Image (cartoon, rainbow, N blue to C red):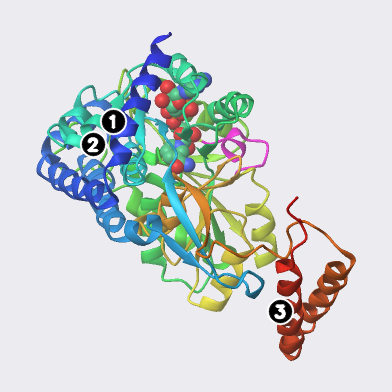
């Protein structure tokens, strides 16, 4: 057995114990885990900032507050989302009852990235555990946070048993996928997502793919410019732009384009970029040197092809590089910054004239994760939001769908498939089982053997009655009774 196979095997044994506990017991442990995370927040924030270099406020708000809020929602929503569900039974199946049971999938493999190393893993673990699964977490090799998750679950009998953290790089991730878990929840780049989906397809293991983005923000001329400029800067630069839903392209209607750009330049100059801050830096470091290289390459390529770049100066090189945030204008479609995910503190600003023109531009991207539309005219904003191809859209706000754990989260196209969060994300962690209960045990069903000409004719009449709507209800009932009689006629003579 390889290391990966033995990890999955052990997790499978643990899952049998976890599934024996009731949903209530698992939710009680999640409540305790939530409090534990709250109590340990200083430790967690320190570990996250040490490993990512992100600003302290980004760590506290996105990683801790977001998780505490999500688990609170989960504990409330899970009894309905995962409990036995009653569904209607058609008249033709009179006397029976129909139910849906949500059962655990088994071992859920969670492969997570480095940009929100705590939030993404913790929320996925919580959902998977609530549904009765065991979890193997494979964190990014750039943000291992070795021992942190184990510390948060220590002493919680079920959750500590359910969770295994497997430390390693992409090669271990690939081996874990090949070891055939029952479900894979992957968050990371489209390139890795494609590899995982290819292996998983061979093994017929279902996969949730939460991939990259190149999100657009569309601003119409009737907005409040101060608020919208502040929103654009936060949406583009929070977590130093290392967010899958960061605004990368800002489309501004031409009549307010100069004013909007000037307001953003003024605000940009006042943002604080620093490492090891005490909650007073707006932007922290770039987490990995390779991401820094991509950002610098995009900026250089844009400049070489004629773009104007404001900011984007490298302050500190090395393991956790620091870069001033940048606004990029005068761009053309052939620039890398227009085609690929930049994943850094860079905002491209483009003017547009009409609704149609901006929609064509936004929908031309292969990535389609989230977007935002800004206008005082809510009808127009809704119309444009509806026409944008993406998984989530905020109106007059930015990255805010993620602020509500009840909303599903996920992308379209190169941004992925499947959903986390919301009831949909919770149920994705379960296997639905269709159940039909027939309490009586004496009658033979009309559609069972033997088939006869009389039965055939009666089924014909039944279909006509069904197609006839409410008026045919009487016909339906009489035909049904005749069929029932036929069914009970002794046709299999005893020898
Ligand atoms: P990545 O794809 O390089 O790595 C993600 C994880 O996959 C890591 O744990 C890595 O070790 C593992 N991995 C790498 N190769 C693997 C393989 N062949 N098989 C199995 N596992 C493998 O991504 P990253 O650089 O860590 O993260 C940044 C990317 O993640 C960006 O594209 C960003 O947009 C995306 N992201 C998406 C979301 C979302 O929810 N849609 C959220 C955060 C980040």
Q: Residues within 10 Å of mark 3 (few under 14, many from 20)?
A: few
Residue 302 position in % (x across, y down)? 57, 34
Position of the N terminus by quadrant? top left
Residue 362 position in % (x across, y down)? 62, 53
Tag 2–tag 1 contact (CB < 8 Å): yes
Label annotation for residue 163:
1
* Residues shaded magenta: 331-341
User: How many numbered circles are shown?
Assistant: 3
Q: CA distance from mark 1 to mark 3?
A: 55 Å
Residue at coordinates 35% horizontally, 54% vertically from top-left?
266
Q: Is residue 338 magenta?
A: yes
Residue 490 position in % (x across, y down)? 74, 64
Query: Circle 3 is placed at which residue position?
Result: 481
Q: Residues within 10 Å of mark 2 (few under 14, many from 20)?
A: many
Q: CA distance from mark 3 to mark 2?
A: 54 Å
The quadrant in which residue 283 appears is top left
Q: Is residue 310 visible?
A: no
The quadrant in which residue 404 appears is bottom left
Residue at coordinates 56% horizontally, 32% vertically from top-left?
190
Query: Circle 2 is placed at which residue position?
Result: 159
Q: Residues within 10 Å of mark 1 (few under 14, many from 20)?
A: many
């Amino acid at each position: 057995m390889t290391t990966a196979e033995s990890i999955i095997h052990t997790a499978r044994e643990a899952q049998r114990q976890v599934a024996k506990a009731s949903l209530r017991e698992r939710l009680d442990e999640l409540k305790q885990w939530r409090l534990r995370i709250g109590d340990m927040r200083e430790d967690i924030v320190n570990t996250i900032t040490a490993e990512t270099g992100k600003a302290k406020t980004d760590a506290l708000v996105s990683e801790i507050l977001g998780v505490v809020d999500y688990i609170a929602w989960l504990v409330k929503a899970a009894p309905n989302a995962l409990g036995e569900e009653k569904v209607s039974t058609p008249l033709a199946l009179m006397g029976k009852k129909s139910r849906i049971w949500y059962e655990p999938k088994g071992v859920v493999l969670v492969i997570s990235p480095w940009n929100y190393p705590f939030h993404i893993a913790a929320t996925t673990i919580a959902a998977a555990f609530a549904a009765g699964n065991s979890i193997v977490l494979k964190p990014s090799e750039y943000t291992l946070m070795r021992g942190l998750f184990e510390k948060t679950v220590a002493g919680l009998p079920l959750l500590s048993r359910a969770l295994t953290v497997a430390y390693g790089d992409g090669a271990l991730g690939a081996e874990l996928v090949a070891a055939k878990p029952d479900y894979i929840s992957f968050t990371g780049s489209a390139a890795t997502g494609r590899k995982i989906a290819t292996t998983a397809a061979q093994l017929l293991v279902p996969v949730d793919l939460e991939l990259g983005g190149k999100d657009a923000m569309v601003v119409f001329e009737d907005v409040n410019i101060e608020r919208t400029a502040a929103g654009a800067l936060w949406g583009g630069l929070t977590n130093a732009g290392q967010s899958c839903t960061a605004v990368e392209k800002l489309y501004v209607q031409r009549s307010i384009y100069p004013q909007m750009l000037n307001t953003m330049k003024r605000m940009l100059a006042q943002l604080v970029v620093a490492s090891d801050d005490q909650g007073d830096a707006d932007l922290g470091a770039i987490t990995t040197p390779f991401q820094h290289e991509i950002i610098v390459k995009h900026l250089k390529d844009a400049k070489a092809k004629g773009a104007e770049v404001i900011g984007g100066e490298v302050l500190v090189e090395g393991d956790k590089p620091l870069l001033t945030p940048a606004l990029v204008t005068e761009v053309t479609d052939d620039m890398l910054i227009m085609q690929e995910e930049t994943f850094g503190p860079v905002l491209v600003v483009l003017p547009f004239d009409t609704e149609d023109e901006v929609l064509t531009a936004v929908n031309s991207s292969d990535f389609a994760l989230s977007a935002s539309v800004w206008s005082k005219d809510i009808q127009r904003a809704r119309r444009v939001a509806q026409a944008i191809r993406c998984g989530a859209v905020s109106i007059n706000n930015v990255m805010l769908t993620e602020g509500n754990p009840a909303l599903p989260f996920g992308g379209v196209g190169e941004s992925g498939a499947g959903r986390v969060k919301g009831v949909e994300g919770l149920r994705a962690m379960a296997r639905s089982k269709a159940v039909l209960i027939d309490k009586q045990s004496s009658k033979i069903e009309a559609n069972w053997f033997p088939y006869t000409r009389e039965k055939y004719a009666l089924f014909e009449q039944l279909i006509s009655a069904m197609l006839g709507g409410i008026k045919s209800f009487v016909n339906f009932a009489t035909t049904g009774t005749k069929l029932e009689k036929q069914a009970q006629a002794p046709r299999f003579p005893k020898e």
